Amino acid sequence: MKYFIVFPEKLYLECRNFLLRDLYNEQFGYLLAGVNQVTDQYVKLLVHTFLPAKNHDDLEYQTTGGICPSPNFQMGVYSKCKKEGHHLIDMHSHPFDTSGYVQFSGIDNRYEFGNGREGVFGFTAMWNPGMYHASIVFGQNSLDARIYCSEIGRAVPIDEIRILRSIIPTSALLLSNQQRATLIHTRKETPLQTTEFPNEINVREKKKKNDFWRRVWKWLLQQL
């Protein structure tokens, strides 16, 4: 089984900028995600929401070497995930780490694993079964990530974090660039003249659309 976390690029940059904004204090936040899963092949957590710990009310403590969310902030997010069906990713920073291989600290391990099922991973696995719970740590030049597997009672590394930089329209899969350009050219509309009446305009536009789709279907049939 492989595990992936997928970010939209804009959201990834927002998270990174927030987590590394202060060189002297760690930062913390939660990510809410959907899931795309193929049994025994892969699990992709699809990030869609960032909930940063912005103020002191969101944090139990915050120092250069450690950070912890407040119980109210923590349980509010846990309840939101349970009620709305989100999966969860904890994020925090090690702003002091400038290496190319940032790692989770002993404090991180105690927070996430505790002693047996006393950590947050074990708690959410019992309280909200079926929810994936992962975590990411950011250094200045690297990151690391892991996900808790309740069936084996431990965390395993995230295989990849992917940044989605663009969305390609599905119609692009049907038509080559040249054919798209031709079809787009045929759809260019002449500016309407003030002397034209609305009914005449509607009839003409409908005819254009019908002609366009006839050409599309004709091309598709030729590819079969």
Image (cartoon, rainbow, N blue to C red):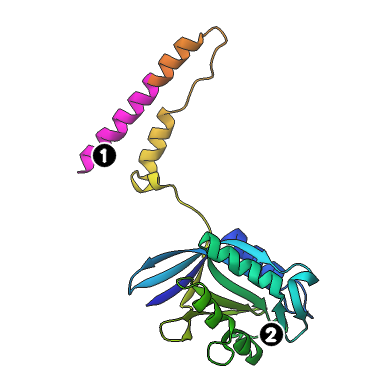
Secondary structure found at label 2: loop
Residue 104: x and y, percent? 61, 86
Task: Name the kind of residue labelled 2 in the image.
Answer: Asp
Q: What stretch is highlighted in magenta?
A: 207-224
Q: Name the residue under label 1.
A: 220
The reply to whether callout 1 and callout 2 are in contact (CB within 8 Å) is no
How many marks are shown on the rendered structure? 2
> In percent of the image, x 43 and y 28: which residue is there?
187
Q: In this view, does 76 lie to the left or right of 41?
A: right
**Left or right, 40 with reference to 67:** left
- Is 53 part of what is drawn in magenta? no
163 or 73: nearer the viewer? 73
Quarter of the image with the N terminus in it: bottom left
Name the N-terminal-most of marks 1 and 2: 2
Image x and y of residue 164, in percent: 51, 61
Q: Which of 146 and 131 is in front in this view?
A: 131
Indicate the quadrant where residue 40 lies: bottom left
Residue sitting at x 26%, y 39%: 220
- Dot label at residue 11: none
Q: What residue type is labelled 1?
A: Leu
Residue at position x 45%, y 51% in the image = 168
| Quadrant of the snapshot with the C terminus | top left
For mark 1, does the 10 Å Cα neighbourhood hold few (<14), some (14 to 19), or many (20 or more) residues? few
Residue that extends furthest to the front in the rendered view of this protein: 127
Residue 14 lies left or right of residue 186; in this view the side is right
Magenta span: predominant SS is: helix
Provide the residue designation for mark 2: 97
The magenta stretch spans residue 217? yes
Q: Which residue is drawn at 66% across and 77% down?
A: 92
How much space separates mark 1 and mark 2, taking CA atoms? 55 Å
